[in-house]
Image (spheres, helix red, strand yellow):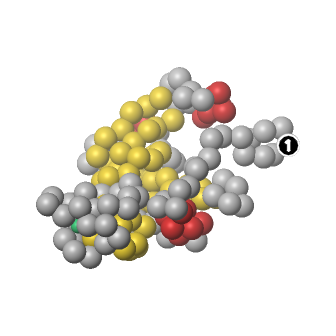
């Protein structure tokens, strides 16, 4: 937060491909893409299917995730990646494997890093950082 209460951290820069993801996030719906030709679940947002031997163009539909997954990997940052994160250290950068398969770069919040381990179950929590943007973050499921 800035002294005037505004959000001063970097924000997403949606493209025509990723805009639907951010629109859904604003409604607290976690989404990814699924190819209607080969069934591959895809994240990050793309316009060409990365499925083996597929490369379908215009074949990726947006579907809703359960918002549940597991910690695939994580690290604890003691050095802010940007000056605006100075007050957040230490914070956790993570890759979460959604139950539907795709992996997502995110933060794990609401936990002490010493209590987090790879393989733990997590669920999405929403951080409404500005009127325009809501960020999906994850917390450990008890
Ligand atoms: Zn495909």
Picture quarter with the N terminus:
top right
Mark 1 secondary-structure assignment: loop
User: Does the numbered disc 1 mark a residue whose Cβ is under 8 Å from ligand 1?
Assistant: no
Residue 125 visible at all = no
Instruction: State the count of labels.
Output: 1
Which quadrant of the render holds ligand 1? bottom left
Res 35 quadrant in image: bottom left
Residue 30: x percent and y percent? 45, 66
Location of residue 122 with respect to 91 vertically, above or below: below
Answer few, some or many: residues within 10 Å of disc 1's Cα (few below 14, many 20 plus, some between 14 and 19).
Answer: few
Q: Which residue is mark 1?
A: 4
In the image, what residue occupies the spot 32% across and 52% down? 103
In the image, what residue occupies the spot 41% across and 46% down? 105
Query: In the picture provided, is 138 more to the left or to the right than 100?
Result: right
In the image, what residue occupies the spot 62% across and 33% down? 85
In the image, what residue occupies the spot 58% across and 71% down? 27
Picture quarter with the C terminus:
bottom left
Residue 99: x percent and y percent? 28, 63
Residue 125: x percent and y percent? 51, 59
Location of residue 99 with respect to 93 vertically, above or below: below
**Frontmost residue, 1 versus 41:** 41
> In the current view of this chain or complex, which residue is farthest to the right?
4
Residue 8 visible at all = yes
Query: In the picture provided, is 67 more to the left or to the right than 22?
Result: left
**Frontmost residue, 62 versus 130:** 62
**Frontmost residue, 43 versus 58:** 58
């Amino acid at each position: 937060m800035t002294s005037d209460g505004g959000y001063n951290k970097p924000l997403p820069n949606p493209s025509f491909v990723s805009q639907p993801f951010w629109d859904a996030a604003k409604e607290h719906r976690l989404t990814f893409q699924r190819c209607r030709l080969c069934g591959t679940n895809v994240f990050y947002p793309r316009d060409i299917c990365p499925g083996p031997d597929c490369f379908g163009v215009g074949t990726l539909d947006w579907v809703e995730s359960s918002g549940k997954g597991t910690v695939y990997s994580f690290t604890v940052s003691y050095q802010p990646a940007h000056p605006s994160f100075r007050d957040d250290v230490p914070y956790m950068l993570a890759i979460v494997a959604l139950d539907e398969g795709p992996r997502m770069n995110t933060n794990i919040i609401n936990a002490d890093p010493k209590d987090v381990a790879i393989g733990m179950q997590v669920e999405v929590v929403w951080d409404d950082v500005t009127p325009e943007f809501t960020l999906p973050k994850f917390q450990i499921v008890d």
